[in-house]
């Protein structure tokens, strides 16, 4: 997967209603976002197909 | 007894002394206020010191003792609160400029419980902005490690780690989303417990990430930790995630025994390529000691811990960004640069990634919970290294690879147990050659804080690390 360029990240930010005016902010946001995308892409090898994305475990006895 | 000795007495001992009228709550509060006035200019553990309120509460507590009233289990004990926790009529900034004027109109559930138990709220403690960690410029002063002012006290519950360690309160309440109680406990050489998610009400905590946040105690001893947990734990209908479970008598279960306990030493953290040799040696020694005390100690491999960092960050930051969206759009300049950049990036994370992260979380949780088929407690270093120098925590992210290194790798030590979600405690287990504390992490199955505290107490009883005091400047 190719990294996103700062211009692409700026376009995403503008579409989200959060334009990034500071160039240093934009550079770091771009690095962070590319790291998230790449790190999560490597997890495609895990057997995720039938897994439910349940955020937190509720103890069975704790259920109302 | 001199004031230094008084300031460092365990809560368990102070409670008895107050009941026997050998220590007055007013004397105790004044002692901490004097120490705060003397040391906190350099330590910056507090954002707001509740001087008048604490003295007034102490006078009432003293009068109650004099009248022979039935006293609560924390009667007259001065406690500090992370400034993320609502306090009625007292500003609650969350370490931010944005909430600089926020004054809650009610107490958080944990504060209500502490007050009902007789505790005195001494002040609101410093933290990284909005409890996120990585703050470059603290709005209320740079918090510093009492063992060496040039080193980091950890975050996000920075002041709640510093203050008990430096004798600036009897105990503190912090909040842990990804290690924010255990990290400061590790860095400052005290005890810090992340309870099970749902064990302690989050009503009145300013949230960072709804599916991860929990409040918990930071104390100088394991027994104090059990005592404070006893007060703040329990079902609360105001928190949708609160567990309807009975709260065990944690204090009564501290028997100093680990005979028959099965302890699993996690290979992925103890032998990580990040590990500092001094930390590794201290944690190995701790595991060996628990073995000599009668526990069965064996190694366990949990390879999915290696992916916990990015999974945690995607979940935490996505949930956090939803809270910050309005302020990011209207007041971006009021954030510290690190928080602003973190939340801007988080706002752009695709929903599919959050969904995938929750799926991987299910896998990680399954692997950790499976380990509890074989073990009662898991054991790990709390951190790869002792507390780093402050300047090294303020690095700007210069590249994607830098982001991997700074954001993901070190989180293998703290975040897997947040994702699980299991209780975990950090206790001191040594010091580096330059005098910085080293922390041991003990983890239990969900809602089994008893096992974690029992193992921690047995270790503490057979070591002296917790008796050391920092050389305040």
Image: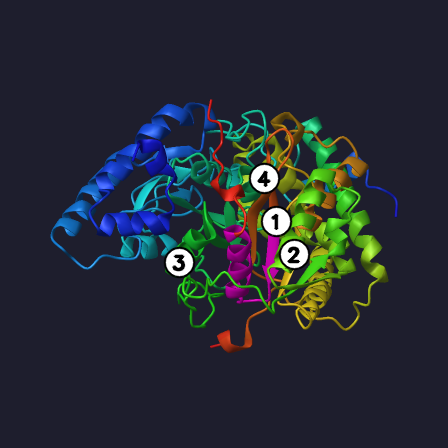
What is the quadrant of the N terminus of chain B in the image? top left
Q: Are marks 4 and 3 in contact (CB under 8 Å)?
A: no
Q: How many marks?
A: 4
Q: Nearer the viewer, residue B241 or B152?
A: B152
Main SS category, magenta section: helix
Q: Nearer the viewer, residue B315 or B56?
A: B56
Q: Are marks 3 and 2 in contact (CB under 8 Å)?
A: no
**Residue A2 seen from this side:** yes
Mark-to-mark CA distance, 3 and 2: 25 Å
Q: Which mark is residue B379?
A: 2
Which residue does the image show at 50% across and 30% down from the upper left? B146
Magenta stretch: includes residue B460: yes
Q: Which mark is residue B440?
A: 1
Mark-to-mark CA distance, 4 and 1: 21 Å
Task: Tell me the quarter of the picture where residue B26 sits.
Answer: top left
Mark closer to the chain start, 4 or 1: 4
């Amino acid at each position: 997967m190719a990294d996103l360029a700062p211009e692409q990240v700026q376009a995403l930010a503008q579409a989200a209603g959060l334009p990034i005016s500071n160039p240093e902010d934009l550079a770091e946001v771009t690095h962070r976002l590319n790291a998230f995308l790449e790190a999560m892409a490597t997890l495609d090898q895990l057997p995720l197909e039938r897994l439910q994305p349940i955020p937190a475990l509720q103890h069975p006895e704790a259920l109302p | 007894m001199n004031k230094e000795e008084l300031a460092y007495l365990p809560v368990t001992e102070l409670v008895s002394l107050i009941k026997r009228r050998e220590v007055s709550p007013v004397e105790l509060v004044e002692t901490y206020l004097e120490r705060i006035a003397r040391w906190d200019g350099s330590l910056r553990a507090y954002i707001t010191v509740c001087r008048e309120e604490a003295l007034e509460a102490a006078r009432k507590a003293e009068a109650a003792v004099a009248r022979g009233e039935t006293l609560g289990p924390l009667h007259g004990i001065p406690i500090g609160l992370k400034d993320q926790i609502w306090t009625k009529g007292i500003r609650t900034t969350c370490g931010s400029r944005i909430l600089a004027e926020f004054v809650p109109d009610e107490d958080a559930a944990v504060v209500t419980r502490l007050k009902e138990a007789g505790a005195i709220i001494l002040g609101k403690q410093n933290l990284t902005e909005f409890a996120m960690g990585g703050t470059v410029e603290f709005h209320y002063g740079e918090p510093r490690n009492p063992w060496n002012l040039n080193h980091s006290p950890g975050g996000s519950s920075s002041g709640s780690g510093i203050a008990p360690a430096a004798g600036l309160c009897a105990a503190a309440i912090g909040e842990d989303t990804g290690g924010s109680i255990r990290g400061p406990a590790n860095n400052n050489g005290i005890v810090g417990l992340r309870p099970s998610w749902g064990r302690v009400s989050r009503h009145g905590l300013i949230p960072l990430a709804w599916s991860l946040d929990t409040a918990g105690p930071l104390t100088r001893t394991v027994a104090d930790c059990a005592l404070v947990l006893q007060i703040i734990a329990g079902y609360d209908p105001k928190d949708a995630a609160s567990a309807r479970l009975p709260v065990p008598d944690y204090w009564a279960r501290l028997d100093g025994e680990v005979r028959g306990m099965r302890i699993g030493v996690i290979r992925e953290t103890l032998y990580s390529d990040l590990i500092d040799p001094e930390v590794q040696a201290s944690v190995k020694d701790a595991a060996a000691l628990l073995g000599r005390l009668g526990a069965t100690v064996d190694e366990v491999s949990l390879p999915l811990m290696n992916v916990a960092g990015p999974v945690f960050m995607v979940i935490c930051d996505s949930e956090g960004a939803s809270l910050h969206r309005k302020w990011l759009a209207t007041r971006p300049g009021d954030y510290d640069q690190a928080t602003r950049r973190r939340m801007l990036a988080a706002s752009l994370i695709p929903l599919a990634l959050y969904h995938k992260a929750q799926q991987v979380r299910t896998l990680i949780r399954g692997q950790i919970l499976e380990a509890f088929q074989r073990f009662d407690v898991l054991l790990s270093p709390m951190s790869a290294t002792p507390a780093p120098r402050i300047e090294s925590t303020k690095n700007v992210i210069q590249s994607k690879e830098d982001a991997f290194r700074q954001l993901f790798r070190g989180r293998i030590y703290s975040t897997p147990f947040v994702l699980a979600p299991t209780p975990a405690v950090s206790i001191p287990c040594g010091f580096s050659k330059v005098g910085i504390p080293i922390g041991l992490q003990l983890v239990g199955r969900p809602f089994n804080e008893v096992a974690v505290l029992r193992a921690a107490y047995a270790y503490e009883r057979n070591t002296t690390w917790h008796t050391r005091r920092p050389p305040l400047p």
